[in-house]
Structure formats: C-alpha cells, structure tokens
C-alpha cells in the first residue's frame, strides 16, 4: 500500500491524533475525524476508512485504556504502523483575553499537571475545570468570554477561533504520544530489521505464577519486550490481560516460536501486528536466537527424525 | 485508631468515593470533599485531615492513574485499608424530564459504555457528551432543561436536585471500585492473616529481563501477587514502575524477605503499606514459606555460624 | 528389528550386564563379552555386534561414568532401549570354605557397603580387599583357598567354580541397575506413549546461570526430566556436560521444540535416542504441551503469516 | 588452628592424596594412611586424627562418589579447606624391566585412558588389568616380574620398590585432583574474600521442577555456583541429592539468605562448610548482592516495621 485513501482518526480536529494522521496521509488522503476509538475501528471494519489512527501511549500518562480495550475486543483489525508526535501545550483564549483577565482554565488533567508550574508563575489566581480532552477544552471557551482560557494542542486555537497567549508551557519538553495505524487484518508488512510485534495475552486464571510463566515464553527465545501493560479483563477484580510489544517481526523465528508458546499457554492471545518501529531501533535477533540458528536447529531435528 | 476525626475524599459529594469514605467514617467524622487525589493526600500531610480516601482500581476500567502516580511521587503517606463499593449507575434528570424528552446524555465514558445497551433500548435517539466524572455530569444538567440527563452514582441525584428516571442501568452487575484509606506513614496495623502489602517498584533500566527478575524476587519466597500494573515513570517511553499488591503482611517473613530483595534489586522501591484485604481472603503463608519455616531457617543459620 | 543377531556386553560373564543382555537376546543371539564400555561401542560401530548392552545407572551408586563419558565422545551410536536388573549379592567361595574360615572378602566397594551389616553379624573378623568389579572379585578367589571369599552377582559362582555360601546379603532389597541397548545411529523406534529421550548437553562456559537457562528450555515446553547428571568435560575444572533423560519421544512436539532450543543454546548437544521406558511409566504430554496444542499453534502462526 | 597434629588420609602412601595431605601438614604432623573415605572421616570423629584429607573431584573423572556419599551421610564433620594436586602418571616396574619386556600394565582405568596414546606408541603389545587405584597397581607388581608394569603417581615407585621407566605419560597435562580438608563441625574459618561454600541438597520428590526451583534460590540472591553434581539418594531410581559449591562465605549475606532459602525449600540440606578456595579466585558479592546492600535492605525493613 502506498498512501491510504482515507484515515479515520480520533477527533476532533486540532488534536495530536490529527497530527499523527497527517504523518501517514498523502496529498489525496481524506482525513475523517470520529468521536471515539471504537468509531475509528468501526470505520475500518465497515470500509468507510482504509486506516484508523488512534493514540496508544503517552510518555506522561501511560497507555490509553480506550485503545487497549478496543483492540482487545475487536476482531478483524491489525496494527500496520506507529507514529510519534511531540506533546506541546499552548494557552489559548478568545481574542481580547489577557493573562490578567483569566479566571478559569479548562483543560485535561494531564495537560493541567504539566502546565501547573507555568500557571502558578504567570496566572496565579485561576481555577481549573477538567475536561475530557484538550480539544474539548478549546471548544468549551465561549466566544468573547475573556475570563476563560484553554490549554490545548497548538492546532486547536485556529480551529476554534481562539488566539494563542503562550506556547509550549508544559514542563516535560520530551513528552510525546505514540499513535497506531490500524487496518483490516491481513499479512503484515515485510520484516525491516527494526520491527515490533504487538500482542494481547490473557493469563490462565488458575495459576499464581502465570505472569512469570508468560514472560518465560519470551525469555526462553531471547525475545526482549519494549512494553508490557496490564488491563483488567473487566468481568471481576484480579483478572488481567497484558498488552505487550516485543522486539522483532513475525518473520523472526524467535518471535514466531514465542507466539506459538503463548498460543499454547494462554486461554486467549490476540496478534495485533508486526510493523516497523517509529524510533528505528534495531530488532534483529542474533546468535542463538537468529533465524539461521533456528533453521540449523530445525534441520538437525529433521536429521534426527530420519527425514 | 478507632475512627478518624476527618476524612478528605475525592469529591464532589455524591460520588462512589464518598460512599467508600462513609464505610470508614464514624458518627463524628468530618467528611471533606476535595478536588483531586493530590489535594486529598495534601490534606493528610498538612494535617487538615486524618485520612484520605481515594479510588485505586475499577473492575471495569482498571487502575486509577492519578492515584497510582500520586502515590509514586508523594512521600510520607501510607495505605492503611481498602474498601469496595459496588458500581451502579442511575439515569437522572431535572424534574419533569421523561425518557422521551431526553436528547443529550452527560456522563463519564466508562459509565456510558456500561449503559449503552440500556440506552439503545430505551433512549435510542440521544447524543452523548463525555464528562470528567459522573458527578460532574450530574452537576452539568441545568435545572429545568428536560432535554438533558446524566448517568451517575445513585447518591448524585439528591445532591444536585435531580430525580432518578431509572436505576442500576449498567450492564455488568458485578462491577465495583476499590478505594484506599491513606494516612501519614507509620507502623502498619497488626497482621490479621488476610492482609495485602502494596509496593511500587521501578525496574533497573539496563536489563532486558528486569521484570522477570523482579517477579522472581516474589516467586523465590512463594509470595503470590494479586495485582500488578505498570505505569510510565513519565520522563520518556520505555521506563515503567510497577504497582504491586502482594498477598501477606510486612510481618510475614516471606513478604519481608521479598521486600528486602526488591530493595536490593530496584533503583527505587516504595512501601505503600500492609493492610487488611477488603475481601477477607486469607493471606497466610504456609509450609516452606510460613513464619515458622523462616524462623527455623534463621536458627539453623545461626547455629552454622557458631552463634 | 526383532532380536539382534549379536550383542556385545560389558563382561565378564556372570555380571549383571549379562543378565540385562539376556533380556534383549533371542534364542539365536550371540552374546559377546567385552572388556570395557568402549569395546562394546566399538563392536557396534565396526559391525562385529548388532547391539551393545552397557550399564548406565545403579540405584545405589549412581551413574556409570565410563558409559556416560563414552556416549559423550563416540559418534554414530544411539540408544534403542533400556533394561532393569535387580541387584542382589551372594557370598561365594571355593568349595570347602565355611563362614568361619573366611579371612579376606573380595568385592567392589559398593557391594561391600551393601553387605557390611550382614558381614558384621556373620563374618565379623574379615578384611576387605576392594576389586574393580564384582566379577573380578569372583575371579580373584584362588581355587582351594578357604580363607578367601567374594561377594558377587548370583551368576558368578557357577562361572568361576565357586559355591554360594549365602544369597541376597545386600541391605537394600530394591536395588537395581539400569542398562542401555546401544546400536548404530538411525531413526528411533516409533513413539509408544511411555518413552524417554536422552541427550548430553554441554553448557556455554561464559554464563553463570547457564544451567538454569538450560533447564528453562525444558520448562518452557512443560517437559519433565527423570534424570540429570553432571560429568566433567575433562579439560579443566568447572566445565560440565549434563546427561539428561527427558520424558517423551522425539515425535512429541514438546520434546522436539525443547531439543531445538537446546541446539540453539548449547555449544554441543548430543541426541542419544528416544526409546521405550523400562518402567512403562506414561510420557504423553497433555494440555498445553500436547501434540494437538502444538499443531494448533503452528496453524495459527501460518494463518497470521498469511500462508 | 595452625597446623593439625594428625591427618588421616585415604592411603596407601604414594597416592595423590598423600601429596595433598602434605600441603596441609606441618613438620610435626602425623600422617595416617587409612583404607577408605569412611575410615578417614571416622578418624576425625573418634579423635584419632585432627583432620582428614580425601579426594573430592578429578578434572578428568569428575566427582569422587565415595567422598560425596560419605559427606552426605556422616554428621559432625565439616570442610575446612581444599587443595589441588596436579595429576601426573609415571610408568614404573621392577628393576630390570624394559619397555620391550612389558606384557601387562596394571593401573586404574582413568590412568589407563590418559596413558593409552603413549602406550600405543611405546608399548604397543600389552594387555591392561584394571585396579582399584593407581597405588594398588604399583603394589600389585610382583618383585622381579619384568613382564609387569604399573602406571601410578610419581611417589609410588619409591614406596613399592619400583623404578620409573617413563615420567608424565598422561595426555592431559592440566589434569588435577581436588582434595578436601575435613574436621569436626564447628564455626567456619573467617571470610577471606575468595571463599566457597559447599552444601548437599535433597530435592523435594513431589515437584517436577524441583531442580529449577532450587537453582532459583541461588539466582534470586545473585550467587554463582562453581560446581553442581548429582548423586542418587540410593533408595530408588529418580531421587537425587545435589552436591553444590557456591561462590562466597557463610558471612556473605547473599550466601546466608540462599542457605536459608534452601533450608525452607529442601527436605534435607547439609552445610558442608565455608572455606578458602584453592585457586584464590575472588568470591566477593558486589552491587545488589553485597553485604552493604543486604544491610541497607535490613535497615529499611526495620524502619518500615517501625522498629
């Protein structure tokens, strides 16, 4: 696939998700904002979009539960790529607003925590009203209300008729969000040598050492994990499924054997995809865990079996 | 301590958190609603409240990030107990509203997901506006607006002048939220035999098998984990701290030795407390991992050393 | 193969090894005593015998070093079966000897240790001269010397012109020796469901946790070991190869994958054979580690790869 | 203790064991040859010798079963040191014997295997009669028999009236044997920083993964093993005890905690001693496993407990 004809992304416009979708989009790609992760995945399944772009992880906040849970329950979708977007926060308000006139700051709690130091210094007497997203904050500021301001992604000001009072006021300048490119299930893109493989694994619920046993399925094949995050299965306390990113591609035999080990071990394992890493970090397995080592072991086994 | 004189809880009034705080409160206990988990912990530290009650985990949604992150960064606080509250959702609105007149439903996304089936059957033509909490949804309904409704905890209707149109409309009837009782650091309550011990452990960042190694610190002492949840450290991708609930009390030698093992292994381990389990499930270590087995091993060691 | 035409066994005649060889021999099988384990294996390689029978393990004494070391260095041979022989010791001497006349008892140190209690009670004033085997002891007794006696296997008396003074004088009545049937390398006998697979594995010498890592190759596939015995590689201290009997057959996928894991992990792994267990104990892998579970995992992998 | 007054060693004189005993002996030490490992240990227990010197491991042949089994069954004895002796083999015979006149070579099978290449080149037409020890071989050569020769330790020739025909004819020039200094149980010698600790551990017989679990008791404390050797318990097949040398001293907290872990895990664990390594290789535990790290963890635990 070159560039997708259409991308459904978690809107509204002006969010970091739109910025991620633009990394993937070509000139002629239609960008379709939707209201939830579920709608984005639905768009892919019903064919109204070729790809969906959804946030999966934020270096400040951690995993995005809605995406992890949707990927655990939808079938027929697969991850084909990932994209990183730096997270910066701007203070924006209706034209005519000054720092002094601001009384109420709308924003998402994470953006607020990141901007607190700046606000204490520059807008000491404000109250904070939390919103469900930073775009929602920008949307909430009523035109002409010079006592209101929003903290949101840079693109939001233009979209909602606001002006930017201050740029990049967040504390952590390295903050970024990772986004997934999701499409209909199919053969993964070819192995590039800097790939990751994502799976969701449910633990058997009758074994105390289940997590340890699951990790040994990777360790026995020398596969490193770059991320492991638990989510409740949702039926009752104490039952978890694990969201795992492993280093390597389905065409790496170490990954293939680890996946088969998980398939035997786990009551439910979901393959989410093998795709190139956004950070281009190398994923080739070497030595004992290289493809040639696996092939040589396979040939040895065949010779023992007299084949 | 019998009953605390004052409890700061994550407000507003009418939330499930208030219901948890009431489990702990005595007749004369002052209940103080505060705006955030951080404020609740601050109240404990500055002495304005003896205890704080904050949500830690929801069987539908998983861990509460704000609480996990606050506990990872505050020092001087400790968990002294936990409380379970069943999660039920009511549909509420201004007096005079009927199911037919409802056009907009305010609620938190998780409450919405739980209520979607009921709404599709009974209020098929509505739009959903997500709010930061269910109490915030109730607060948002403007008096006299019969086109608005909120989905919130049962107690919210009375607090915000609304009437209940339908009760317990959530799909999962087993859903519950777990709350923590937090106080100033000090010696834990005595071992009861049905205890849990909570810690936050940062992994050394130079070892691929760090998580496996951490889990072996528990496994080598026969300690079962009832919960393990990862949170980003927050400085960059790929660095995690793990929130762990282990079965047993600081006075269980298996727990004590596992904690010391973690202390040696981890660059940072935070002891959050040993406290009675809300579900009264037994936590006594038996056989090889019992206190007598530890004492006998200690005596044997002393005899070998010629002491 | 029905019955072998010829069997080389570790002689001399009258040993327990001959008794094992007779379990395997048919009416027309030639039994060829040889002087060492090496000669027995040589006979198989040069075609002068179809099979060799050699002792591998004694429940009193442990592994037979000579056999373990020969199997580690010979190539072209393979184990095709195992046989158990109860170990009983008789006291034998020249005709005319009485218990009272005995002054010197010849025997192998293990046989002596087993018979010590009986000797203390019945022949209290004797001295012991250790010999290299029990058959060598019987051979050493000089005809007509009524002050000498030997402790040896029941069959030795007749062979060396001695009479039995007392039968079954060993302390442990359960003692037995296990023998191997060795032939030229080839496809193993078919899987019976009560099989074992023997390998010799050298550890990589640069890893402190090498043994643990090796055992995890079995554990990750749910393969139980019935025997693990270390032998020095022989070049210097601290380098070991491990003699391992695993439960199952080369046609059990759990065994096959574990063997391939060892092949990747170890600088040298020798497949010694898959063959029926003498004790008929079941070796079928069930549940996660059954052949159907492996096949289902393989098919799942193929489907993910789009094949 | 400076030098022992008396040492019982596994005789006869002229063996490598005597050479080891001389490393430990002072000018006034009485050296007492005894007939077996058991006698040597008995001498220590009944006070007829202060120390016993017995072989434990040969770099060619592996562990000495008799010593391992005696240490597993005696109580009241402990290892206080180890000594290495290079293993060299001389060909010796009655005066007047020439290489050409030799027809029979007496020696222990291991010495024979080591000397086979040399013999094939220089004494091609000989037969080999195995003996129980190399000293026994020297003793067997009848005075004046010029068709007999023995392969034995250098010291044996003088003791048994033989002359040396060829020196150091063994193949492996690095070969050595390790000997133990055994005394009555008591407080170990102080930690030197290049120590080892020896234990014998029986596995619980009801757990398939028992060996893995035992090794994890060491791994969880970062303790490396320099030797692990299995021996049958002796009652029936499939039950093993493991002879283990671990890096470090009883006063190393990593060792102490690992030992206590074994004590809890194992139905029977025997502490054989902490003593200086003969090869002076460093055994200090660093980083997470150092004594300061253990002390700091202990203090942290005490502070959590409010002590």
Image (cartoon, coloured by chain):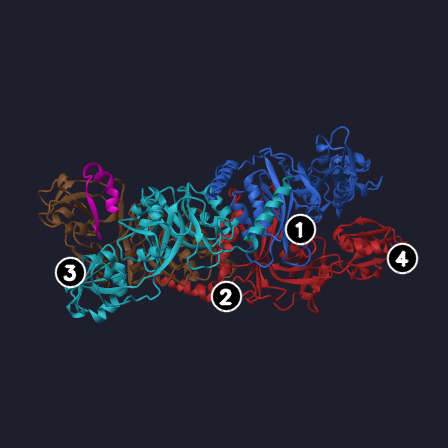
Chain colours: A red, B blue, C brown, D cyan
- Marks 2, 3: nearer the viewer: 3
What secondary structure is found at the residue carrying circle 3? loop
Q: Which mark is residue D143?
A: 3
- Marks 2, 4: nearer the viewer: 2
User: Which residues are the magenta region?
Assistant: C110-133
Query: Where residue C137 sits in the image (x, y, percent)?
Result: 18, 50
Q: CA distance from mark 3 to mark 1?
A: 94 Å
Q: CA distance from mark 2 to mark 4?
A: 59 Å
C34 in relation to B269, above or below: below
Looking at the image, do the residues carrying marks 2 and 4 touch, with CB atoms under 8 Å apart? no
Q: Is residue C113 magenta?
A: yes
Q: CA distance from mark 2 to mark 3?
A: 64 Å
- Marks 3, 4: nearer the viewer: 3
**Tag 1: Cα neighbours inside 10 Å, few (<14), some, or many (≥20)?**
some
- Marks 1, 4: nearer the viewer: 4
Label 4 sits on residue: A97
Observer-nearest residue: D194 or C296?
D194
Looking at the image, do the residues carrying marks 1 and 4 touch, with CB atoms under 8 Å apart? no
Are discs 2 and 4 located on one and the same chain? yes
Label 1 sits on residue: A66
Observer-nearest residue: C66 or B201?
C66
**Tag 3: Cα neighbours inside 10 Å, few (<14), some, or many (≥20)?**
some
The answer to whether residue C86 is visible is: no
Give the left or right position of residue A209, taking residue A21 as reference: left
Q: Which mark is residue C306?
A: none
Q: CA distance from mark 1 to mark 2?
A: 36 Å
What secondary structure is found at the residue carrying circle 1? helix
Label 2 sits on residue: A286
Give the left or right position of residue B131, taking residue C291 as reference: right
Give the left or right position of residue B177, taking residue C263 as reference: right
């Amino acid at each position: 696939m070159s560039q997708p004809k259409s991308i459904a992304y978690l809107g509204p416009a002006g969010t970091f998700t739109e910025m991620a979708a633009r990394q993937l989009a070509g000139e002629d790609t239609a960008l379709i904002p939707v209201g939830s992760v579920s709608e984005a995945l639905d768009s892919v399944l019903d064919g109204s979009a070729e790809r969906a772009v959804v946030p999966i992880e934020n270096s400040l906040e951690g995993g995005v539960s809605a995406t992890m849970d949707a990927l655990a329950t939808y079938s027929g979708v697969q991850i084909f790529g990932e994209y990183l977007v730096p997270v910066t926060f701007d203070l924006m308000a209706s034209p005519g607003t000054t720092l002094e006139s601001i009384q109420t700051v709308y924003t998402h709690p994470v953006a607020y925590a990141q901007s607190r130091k700046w606000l204490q210094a520059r807008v000491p007497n404000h109250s904070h009203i939390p919103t469900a997203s930073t775009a929602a904050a920008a949307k909430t500021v009523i035109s002409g209300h010079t006592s209101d301001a929003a903290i949101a992604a840079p693109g939001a000001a233009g979209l909602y008729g606001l002006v930017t009072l201050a740029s990049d006021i967040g504390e952590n300048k390295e903050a970024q969000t990772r986004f997934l490119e999701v499409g209909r299930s199919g053969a993964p893109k070819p192995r590039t040598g800097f790939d990751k493989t994502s799976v969701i694994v449910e633990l058997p619920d009758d074994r105390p050492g289940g997590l340890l046993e699951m990790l040994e399925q990777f360790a026995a094949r020398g596969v490193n994990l770059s991320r492991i995050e638990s989510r409740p299965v949702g039926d009752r306390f104490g039952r978890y499924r694990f969201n795992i990113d492993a280093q390597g591609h389905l065409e790496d035999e170490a990954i293939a054997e680890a996946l088969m080990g998980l398939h035997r071990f786990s009551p439910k394992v979901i393959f989410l995809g093998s795709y190139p890493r956004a950070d281009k970090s190398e994923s080739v397995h070497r030595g004992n865990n290289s493809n040639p080592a696996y092939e040589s072991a396979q040939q040895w086994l065949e010779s023992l079996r007299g084949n």
